Amino acid sequence: MRFTVNGVPREVDVEGDMPLLWVLRDELGITSVKYGCGIAQCGACTVHVDGIAMRSCQLPADSLEGAAITTLEGLAEGETLHAVQEAWIAHQVAQCGYCQAGQMMQAADLLATVPDPTDADIDDFMGGNLCRCGTYPRIRAAIHDAAARLREG
Amino acid sequence: MSRVGKIARRSFLIGSAVLAGGVAFGVYTVRRPHENPLEAGLAEGEVTFNPWVLIGPERITLITPHADVGQGVAHMQAMLLAEEMRLDPGQFDISFGDPSPAYWNRAMGEEGAPFLSSDQGFAARTTRTAMGAVMKVLGMQVTGGSTSTPDSFDKLRLAGAMARETLRRAGEIRTSIPSDQLRCESGAVVLPDGIRIPYTELSAQAATIDPVEDAPLTPRSEWRLIGQETERLDIVAKSTGQQVYGIDVSVPGMVHAAARVNPRRGVLSSYDASAARAMRGVSEVVEVTNGVAVVADNTWRAFQAVNAVECTWGPAPYPAEQADHWAEVAASFTDARLDREWRAEGDVEAALSGDVIEAEYRAPYVAHQPLEPLNAIVRVTEAGVEVWTGHQMPRFLQQQVAGVTGHEAEQVTFHNQFSGGSFGHRLEFQHVTLAAEIAMQMPGVPVKLTLQREEDFAQDFPRQIGMARGHGAVANGRVEAADIQIAAVSSSRSQMGRIGQNVPGPDSQIPAGVWNAPYAIPSYRVRAYAVPELAPTSSWRSVGASSSGFFGESFLDELIHAAGADPLAERLRLANDPRAVAVLEAVAEMSGWGRSPGENRGLGVAMVESFGVPVAEVIEVETTPQGIRIRDVWVAAEVGTVVDPVAFENQVQGGVIWGLGHAINCEITFADGMAEQSNFDSHDGMRIWQAPRIAVRGVELGGPVRGIGEPPVPPAAPALANAIFAATGQRLREMPFNRFVDFV
């Protein structure tokens, strides 16, 4: 299978049904993508596939030929962090932090779709991303902040 | 281990009045300091003044031995040291350090003494001191019980001050300028003319002098870091995907393992691994205690293969069906199972001779399930063992692993890791010893065991199951009597029993939050009943108070409503501790208590003290066509001094969400001896769309500094149930509440 990860062409020789999650973690060593549930119930494994936030635990490798995959490492542009990451730092969202890469990938897609989301938009779009530490109030605040940062450019 | 250590280990009990071992230590044993573990590994030019500070020519390393499971204690510990050392963030590295008795937890001994937090009497003080001695002699390095901040607050400031003053003395020797003319500032000793000598350049000099033992602490008015909003040391790594957790650690030559252990916790009767052995990437199939493990070249391949093993499991050593668990609990309100009468004030029998208000409550088993599944890397060689995982009891981990591999505990090298949550889960050892069992069968090869989420659920040791019966009386608009009986399995005994620790005496966690409630009810009796072990259980964030707090504060609310009194005003009238009064007054003000919340809305309040911290919560709910929506929570907690305001708010908000989410929709039930819930589709917790706004206030009355990781949890469930009653008239007496009402 051939695809790009964060702009870099990659080729892997794996079973067609190996989920992208494990291709990224165990075959390519990209560990920001987390295993949480394996059944699309927690969102810790969220990445962008051709710009859309998706659960990498549910994407078989053989569905990814030619895809452009982005992980949190690829969200920043060089040294410049994505507005979502800047907001996550400014609001000190993370506790254990294990879900936060997935949360940020989902939030980045939300803001690409809805530039100025309401709390209801956030609740709808982020509802599949579980945080066991309970950082939801800060996630909401950080998304509003990131939206403002993106508007201001 | 020494003989005295063995005696103490056998008789040690967190939370018991029984201190059989405590009196056995001589004064010398107790006073003798533990060796500084940093001394053994000092390189050329490095110096250490105490177990928390290491300074070399190139870098400064601060040791933060309390495990960071997301609660932010690595940062908190570093800030305490850096404050006194006059270091700025960025001028030092942090390390969890090697396991050492020097990192014994003083606060856990003191907090575990079964006395009211307000009790400063002789027995209370003596017992706290004795339990502290037990912790010290055993070198109990434990992160838990919301003790990291109280344990560290004085200890690490003193360690930092000692380092600072010793470096200043070294500066004096170097420059011949009297030390009172030298300042310590921003990682350097500063001369009167402004010339700076970085600490790193003074390490060799400092190594030649005795550490300054009587260094003064920085007054609060001069704190730069403590009590201030600082940027967590791990926040950038956790916002850029760079944070390495145990599950991310990679060791050269490492293989990946997955396991399935009997979900009934019985034996593995037989298995057929022929299909698994033929699968791509699989190198080994090995037997482990009560189960089977597969080793492969990739985690997913190991998962697939172990799931392809056909296993026949033996029966459970506990009742196979959930109804029988409840029946056993319900049958435990007997004199024979009385664990202790914890409180007896007034004349309860007389007070209950007239009209009696009765109610019965239930709290189910609940799973921990932090988002990072349990995992561990173990490498076994003849010379020793290496372990990489995130764990809260490093020295017990060494002992447990050594018990599997046949080494001495000292031969087990432990590399502690940042963890993706715990909530009590990473106080357990089974996943680590399981990894050691597999690694034993592949000498020299680092084996990483990762539990599938379903396996993590199946092998979780859940929160205790319990019930309560309340009998009470009211008169003249007041609560006059409350007689509360609580029956639960002892999670403390279950947990300690798994590591060979005997737990004699009553378990104060069974009635936690009720026996110590800071209320002066004229007639008040609390009796705890110990239900014999059913399914094995463990500490779950806030332990006993997570269920008993719900019982006590729900029943009190029922009595207050029966009396026709105001729920918050009557609690304030009953409160007999200034800290409890302060948090109740705070949430009254924050929530605008007394206002009419409007149609379809209701306000509820609860206040529970746990781990020495009274926390009051007011919750506002709204009934909607889609179900009950939790709109707002107002929380006030009294911890003496708020050491890290960012972590404080995060822990309070997270604790409230933890308490609410599980009260709404989580339970573990058993059928055919197995937990019926296996993933987050059947044990949800709170999602963002259910999360209320949460306003937080830290009340600082300046008393002992206490921890905030657990105390916000217990009041959440009763405050919610009380709010739902206010909004709907429906009283919820059993968790999870979604068995009875719908939530948005």
Image (cartoon, rainbow, N blue to C red):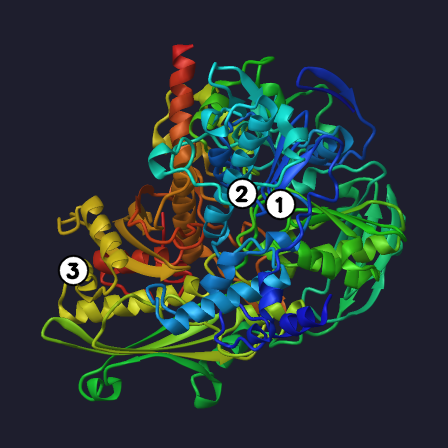
Disc 1 and disc 3 on one polypeptide chain: yes
- Amino acid under disc 3: Ala
Across and down, in percent, residue B612 comes to 38, 59
Q: Quadrant of the N terminus of chain B?
A: bottom right
Across and down, in percent, residue B283 comes to 89, 46
- The residue that appears at 42% across and 28% down in the rendered structure is A142
Task: Write down the residue under mark 3.
Answer: B569
Q: Work out whether mark 1 precedes mark 2 in sequence or the reverse, and give the earlier one.
A: 1
For label 2, count other residues whose C-alpha is less than 10 Å away and answer few (under 14), some (14-19) or many (20+): many
Pick the front one: B700 or B307: B700
Across and down, in percent, residue B651 comes to 43, 45
Dot 1 and dot 2 residues touching (CB under 8 Å): yes
Q: Work out whether mark 1 precedes mark 3 in sequence or the reverse, and give the earlier one.
A: 1
- The residue that appears at 70% across and 33% down in the rendered structure is B46
Callout 2: chain: B
Residue A75, placed above or below residue A134: above
SS under mark 1: loop
Callout 1: chain: B
Is A14 left, or right, of B466 in this rendering? right
Task: Write down the residue under mark 2.
Answer: B159
Task: Write down the residue under mark 1.
Answer: B51
Residue A51: in sight, yes or no?
Answer: no
Residue B268: give its label. Answer: none
- The residue that appears at 55% across and 14% down in the rendered structure is A80
- Amino acid under disc 1: Pro
Question: Residue furthest toward the top?
Answer: A153
SS under mark 2: helix
Callout 3: chain: B
Q: Work out whether mark 3 precedes mark 2 in sequence or the reverse, and give the earlier one.
A: 2
Residue A25: in sight, yes or no?
Answer: yes
Across and down, in percent, residue B488 comes to 47, 74
